[in-house]
Amino acid sequence: MNSNKPAYNNRLGLKGWVYAGKYTFERYLYLGHRLTGMGLIAYMLLHIIETANRMRGVEAWEELMGLFASWPFKIIEYLLFAAAVFHALNGVRLLMTELGFFLGKPKEPVYPYSSSIKRHRPLTYIIMALAGLIIILGGSSLFFP
Amino acid sequence: MSDKTITPREITFRVRRFDPDVDSAPHWSEYRQHVHDGMTVLEALHQLKAEQEPTLSWRSSCRMGVCGSCGMFVNELPMLACQTQVLHLGTDVVTIAPLPNYDNVKDLVPDLAPLIEKHASVKPYIIYLDQIEIDEPTGEFIQTPDQREEFSQFTHCIKCGLCLAACPTVATDPLFLGPQALAQAYRYTADNRDCGMKDRIEAIDIFHGPYQCHLAGACSQACPKGVDPAFGIQLLKRALVLDNIGFGKKKSSVAKVMPLADVVKAIDEFAPPPRTVVK
């Protein structure tokens, strides 16, 4: 290549991080794990600001609590709960795989190739089903106490 | 695969073009071409270049999935052009772009330098502490079939770079070592002849190291050789954890050197597997 011009920056950036496209289920879990992680960090900051309102006196606190009892906030609270459940259970899956569990053993690749991702997919489905069940049960107790 | 998808027919190729001498940004060009059953994307590109677009550039060599040169982003997935049959893609429009997450040199040519630099940074070679034995070998390093099986899968890497193009972490973190280098770090760390974990830790146990991987599995999906780099990264994480808590591979567990005379005596122990085809 004789050109002295710089190459084109072809890094996907945020789009490559967010858009899972034709990749497998685990790629979507990756996205969900990171989004819920960021959501939980954002909540932690908001929670500190929210509880700091107690310093403004009982009336201000009660007023704020009344606001949080409204439906829009109940829905936000439920989404937060769902994010926490998903992140925690998917985190357990990641911890187990990081320690080498449920991935099988390395073996000579023979076509059609099998991957550790496929081998631990039953665990993935079980954990996601469990997360779904907890989220549904949590929703019923939150909205229909 | 339905009959429709393997019927020879006209296919529209949407090819991303970029010439740094002329263009400030890439653009898409479309070409119609007759495709026959069994024709690979690489063959289609050769035909396109011969008949319609002589300036079209890409990189390829062996055309049999060994050299790893012809990695491209075909229909939004990283693939080797020589191993991908056009009609098996099942679409009437085939989009071909250069591998993402690498700089684009021209048309379909990515700059694979970061891949090679990251690969080199993890010390992808056997590190043996006994320099005298290396300089003046007295025998052979012994490795049983089971010991080889622990890392054999990862030796099949052809450095095509598809895994880095697929990795969502590499997309946003250019310093992330990536699936290829990390899987190769595991390949050498797991080798019983290697005692380089301590040396290698400096390069891999870093912020942009294996813990940035959250098992998206895209690298393993993209790998054309069944290397399963995501698996290598998870095993590397385990090796690092074990090393950090003091249960890592000890120096005493490295391969013994067997004098050549003893190798001949022990030949039965390392005999090849039984014949599978009867004469």
Image (cartoon, rainbow, N blue to C red):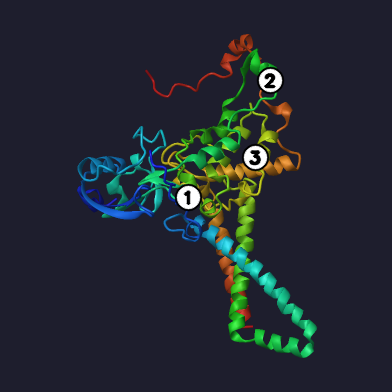
Q: Earlier in the sequence, mark 3 or mark 2?
A: 2
Q: Earlier in the sequence, mark 1 or mark 2?
A: 1
Q: Quadrant of the C terminus of chain B?
A: top left
Image disc number at residue B101: 1
Label 1 vs label 3: CA separation?
21 Å
**Chain name for mark 1:** B
* Camera-nearest label, 1 or 2: 1
Badges 3 and 2, same chain: yes
Q: Which label's residue is closer to the chain start, 1 or 3?
A: 1
Question: What amino acid is found at the position of numbered circle 1 in the picture?
Answer: Asn
Q: Position of residue B81 (x, y in %)?
A: 35, 42
- Image location (x, y in percent) of residue A42: 64, 69
Q: Secondary structure at mark 1?
A: loop
Question: Residue B259, relative to residue B32: is it above or below?
Answer: above
Q: Residue B203 got which mark?
A: 3
Q: Quadrant of residue A60?
A: bottom right
Seen from the viewer's position, the closer of residues B162 and B224 is: B162
Q: Which mark is residue B48?
A: none
B274 horizontally vs B196: left or right: left
Residue placed most toward the observer, B4 or A136: B4
Q: Amino acid at mark 3?
A: Ala
Q: Secondary structure at mark 2?
A: helix
The residue depicted at 64 percent of the width and 62 percent of the height is: A88
Residue A143 seen anywhere in this rendered image of the structure: no
Secondary structure of the residue carrying numbered label 3? helix
Q: Which residue is mark 2?
A: B131
Q: Are marks 1 and 3 in contact (CB under 8 Å)?
A: no
Q: Residue at x 34, y 43 (%)?
A: B84
Q: Which chain letter goes with mark 2? A: B
